[in-house]
Amino acid sequence: MKATLTVLRFAAALSLVGATVAATSVAAAQDAQDDPPSQRVPQTGQDADALRANLKTIKLPPGFRIDLYAVVPDARQIAIDPRNGEVIVGTTGSRVWRVIDRDKRHVADDVSALASSTPMKMPNGVCFAPDGELYVAEQNRVLAFPAAQTAANGKPDVVVQQGTLIPSKFESRGHSARVCRVGPDGKLYIALGQPWNVPPKDAWPELDRNGLGGIVRIDRDGRHREIVAHGVRNSVGLDFNPKDKTLWFTDNQVDMMGDDIPPGELNHVTQAGQHFGFPWYGGGHVRTNEYKDSTPPAGVVFPVVEYAAHAADLGMTFYTGRLFPAHYRGGIFAAEHGSWNRTTPIGARVVFTPLNDDGSVGPTEIFAQGWIAPDGKYTGRPVDVQALPDGSLLVSDDYAGALYRISYGSSK
């Protein structure tokens, strides 16, 4: 199990456990329900204990605490059912996980595979519509689970057929983790990363025509596709501002340009069809070497926030809860996955950007950090952030294979 192997790495590094983490208990999984053992994830034992011990290194602002919510292998994008608070988690493997807190103790009782009989490929993007219909954006297909089907673990409907979300020739392991949201207009929004660090000039026109390196929207039945944002290298996080209903998204910058450039991005779409600079710009106002002699499109929209270079800003959310202090309400939390080739690692944290009444942003601040050990090795890598109905914040971690819950005050 990926989570077990991951826990072994960081537990050994931090001396959090004194013995080899045991293999997942088949008997425990079989006892949970009738699913095959591989379709359920035990929530007790040495894996969970090591994850909890690892959280002792995490630093938060005064008054906040972080706890293990669930052991979830390859935990990536988070979706929370608006009807009952049930948590769905996407992965870059072949599974989508259902995470259930039956007794409302703020910790998962059961983690099981959703629609385990349905083959999936990189089902990273998960999002709910207000009526409880769940959408799963795979690498090159989109599925929909009507509300009753999600609860019954039934067979999904196919909204976008395999091979038609993007041209199949552009399928790649890199930049293929889709994210989705159902917008205030009732349409399904999907971010489509393009497969290159910087695409060849002769490839870009076809990529752009198909919405790769951009964000598209479709009707919930898959029809009427249009491109909402162009010039987006690889967005793995988007959300709508609940106040004015506009779309915001993170974007990952170009690699191999140095440790400190270009910056990561938080962008704001104010009009459909806007261009956000890539591949002429590699992040912020930094021009790419490959396109520096070419004229950028007119009217390029530059980021509202420039994040630290190579911190790998992924999932984001507007905080609409009431549990956290007033400073955080209406602002933006974002998960930074962490750099992969920077000389000194950076990221592996959660950051917060306050939003002013006039829609402008305040300075970005570090909210949760400590997933980089003193030797520079990762002990966890945050991917997404989403608020539970009680206002606490879930953080997914695909490296450690976990969901964490951040709460405030006396609430646990």
Image (tube, rainbow, N blue to C red):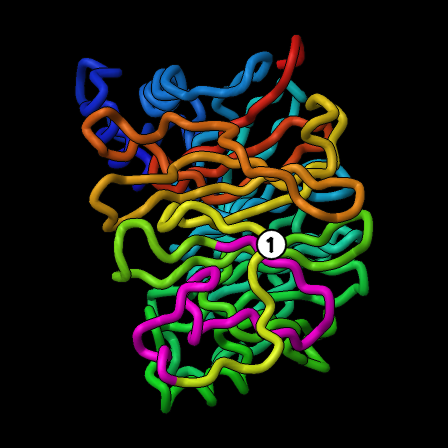
Tell me the residue at 27%/50% (across/down). Answer: 259
Tell me the residue at 44%/61% (across/down). Answer: 283
Vertical order, 188 against 383 (above or below): below
Q: Relative to 274, is 62 on the left or the right?
A: left
Please report the bounds of the magenta region as a residue range.
265-293
Vertical order, 248 against 377 (above or below): below
Q: Relative to 53, is 208 on the left or the right?
A: right
When asked about the image quadrant of residue 125, the answer is bottom right
Percent position of residue 390, x then y = 72, 26
The residue closer to the viewer here, 160 or 362, is 362
Tell me the residue at 56%/63% (across/down). Answer: 302
Tell me the residue at 28%/34% (across/down). Answer: 378
Amino acid on which disc 1 is placed: Val
Q: Relative to 385, is 22 on the left or the right?
A: left
The residue closer to the viewer here, 25 or 173, is 173
Percent position of residue 119, x then y = 45, 63
Tell me the quarter of the image containing the C terminus.
top right
Tell me the quarter of the image containing the N terminus.
top left
Helix, strand or loop at label 1? It is: loop
The residue closer to the viewer here, 30 or 50, is 50
Residue that badge 1 annotates: 304
Residue 234 in sight here:
yes
Decide whether residue 295 is among the magenta residues: no
Vertical order, 403 against 50 (above or below): below
